Amino acid sequence: MAERLHDVCGNVGVFNRARSMNARDMQKHTTKRKWFSFGSRMMRRGGAVLIALTCVLGLSVTGQAQTENVLYAFNGGSDGALPITNLVADAWGNYYGTASLGGSFAGNLCAPQGCGVVFQLSPDSMGGWRQKVIYTFMGKSDGMLPLAGLAMDAKGNLYGTAAAGGSFQGSDCADYGCGVVFQLRPNEKGGWVLCVLRRFQGGKDGFSPYGPLVFDAQGNFYGTTPVGGYYRNGEVFKMSPNGYGGWKYSIVHFFTGRRDGGFPSQQVAVDAWGNVFASTDEYGGNCAYGIGCGSLTELSPNSAGGYTPTVLYVFQGGMDGGTPGGLTLDKYGNLYGAAFHGGSLSSTCLGESDGEGCGVVFKLSPKSGGGWRGEVLYTFQGSTDGALPSSALTIDRYGNLFGTTQSGGDSNCNYCGVVYELSPTHGGTWAETTLHVFTGGNDGAEPGSNGVTLDAYGNLFGAAQNGGDACFLSAGCGVLYEITP
C-alpha cells in the first residue's frame, strides 16, 4: 500500500516503493475514457509573418546502417503500458521514463486501463537490460496519466507531470482531476519518494499538463498546460526553488489565441540568459488548414520580474509547415524543431492528414543585428523517410539532428513511423537518413513525440508507444529500444 507522508516540499506526497503485482487478465481495449483524449491531441497535432522560412534542398537516404535492439516490451500489467516518454539517463547508465497506462487498476479511474507508472531501465551483468517500476500512480492526489517523459536535476531527482489526478475541485477537475507536477527522490533504502510540487486547479490556473519539463542553468524548470489559463488557451509556467526545501510556482506567459497561438503542448527551450522559447499547436494567424497552424514565441525576462513575449514566427501551413512540436537550442543559440503538418501539400501523407502535408524540420538562427532568420531544413515525403514528425530534436556534437515521426515508413504495418537523422552537408543542404523503420511487430510502432536520447558512444535510446507483446491494447503496449551504429 502507498504510505502518505509530509515531505520537505511542503505537500502531502505519496511514498510508493517499486513492488510486484499479480498480472491481471485484461480484455482488449475497446473504449477510450474521456480523460485519455488528452493523448490524442498530442498525436494530431491572420498575423503577419515576422521572418520567412526559406527552403533548403533536403536529400533522403533510404539505406539503413543501424541495428535496433528491443530492450524491453511492456506487457500492460504492473509494468505499465503505452510509453509516451523520452528517456533520461543518470551518471550510471540507467534510463528513466513513464508509461501512461498500466500499473495500478484499483479504483474507478484506474480500473479500465491503469493510471500509469514511472520506470527505471538498467543494464544487467549479463549484457541485457532490466525494467523496474519505481512508482505506480494511484489516480488520487498523486496524479495519473503521465503523458510525457522526465527531467533530472544534478542530484538525481526526477521531475515530471501527470495530465490527470491531483485536485478534483472545480468544473475542470471534477471528473478526472486537473493534473500535477511531481518530484521523485531516491531514498537511503533504495526506494523513491514522490512529492507533489503542484496540483493544478483548472480555470485560470491551467490544467492537464503533459509537455516535458526543461531545466535552466539556475535550477528552475519550465512546463506548459495546453488548456486553461487566463485566456483559456494554455500557459507556460515556471517552478523555482524557494530556499526552504519547497518550490514556487509562477506564470511565464498566458497564451491569448491570437498571434502568439494557443494550445502549447510541447517542450519549451531555455537559453543561457533565461529566455524561454515556446511553440503552440493552434491559432496564430491565417493557415492553409484548420483554425491556425501555431506560432513560435520568445519570452524574455524583464525588469518588472515578468516576461515580455515576442512572436518570432506564425506558421502558414504551406511549405513552411504547421503545428510545431518541441524546441531544441544548440550551443550557438540556433533553434530547431519539427512541424507535424505542412511541407509538400501535394502529398496526402498516406491518407492520414487529408492533404495537410507530411511535415518539415526547421531552423531559426539569430541575426547579428537582431531578429531571426528561418529556413526549412527538410520536407518529409511520407515514404520510407517518415511522416508527421512531432518529437523535439536531439543534437550530437557534430551538429547532426535526430528525431522520430509518428507515421511513414513501412506500408505493411499501416505506416508505423521511423527514427531519422538529419546531417548538414558541405554544400549547405541537409541529408536525411532513415535509421530505423518500425514494423509494428516486436520492434514497436509509432514513436510519436518521444524522440531519442544519445549516449556517449552514439547509441540512440527511445520508446515506441505501440507494438511489442500482445496486451490489452490491441496494437501492443509499447517497447523500449536502442539503435546502434
Image (cartoon, helix red, strand yellow):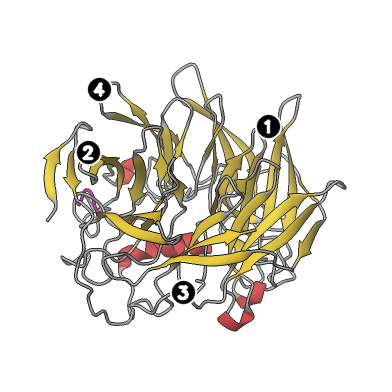
* Residue kind at label 4, given as amino acid type: Tyr
Classify mark 4: helix, strand or loop: loop
Q: Which residue is mark 1?
A: 332
The quadrant of the image that shows the C terminus is: bottom right
Cα separation, mark 4 vs mark 3, equals 45 Å
- Segment colored magenta: 164-168
* Residue kind at label 1, given as amino acid type: Tyr
Q: Residue at x 30, y 43 (%)?
A: 182
Report if residue 167 lies within the magenta region.
yes
Q: Which residue is mark 3?
A: 467
Classify mark 2: helix, strand or loop: loop
Percent across and percent down for residue 313 are: 65, 42
How many residues crowd mark 2 within 10 Å: few (<14), some (14–19), many (20+)?
A: few
Percent across and percent down for residue 396 are: 64, 44
Cα separation, mark 2 vs mark 3, equals 36 Å
Q: Which of these two is toward me, 118 or 305?
A: 118
Label for residue 306? Answer: none
Classify mark 3: helix, strand or loop: loop
Q: Which residue is mark 4?
A: 244
Q: Which residue is mark 2?
A: 188
**Residue 275 versus residue 207 in the image, above or below:** above
Question: Viewed as shown, does residue 85 lie left or right of 36?
Answer: right
Compare marks 4 and 1 and give the one earlier in the sequence: 4
How many residues crowd mark 3 within 10 Å: few (<14), some (14–19), many (20+)?
A: many
> Mark 4, mark 2: which one is toward the viewer?
2
Compare marks 4 and 2 and give the one earlier in the sequence: 2
Q: Which of these two is toward me, 469 or 84?
A: 469
Q: Residue furthest front?
A: 126
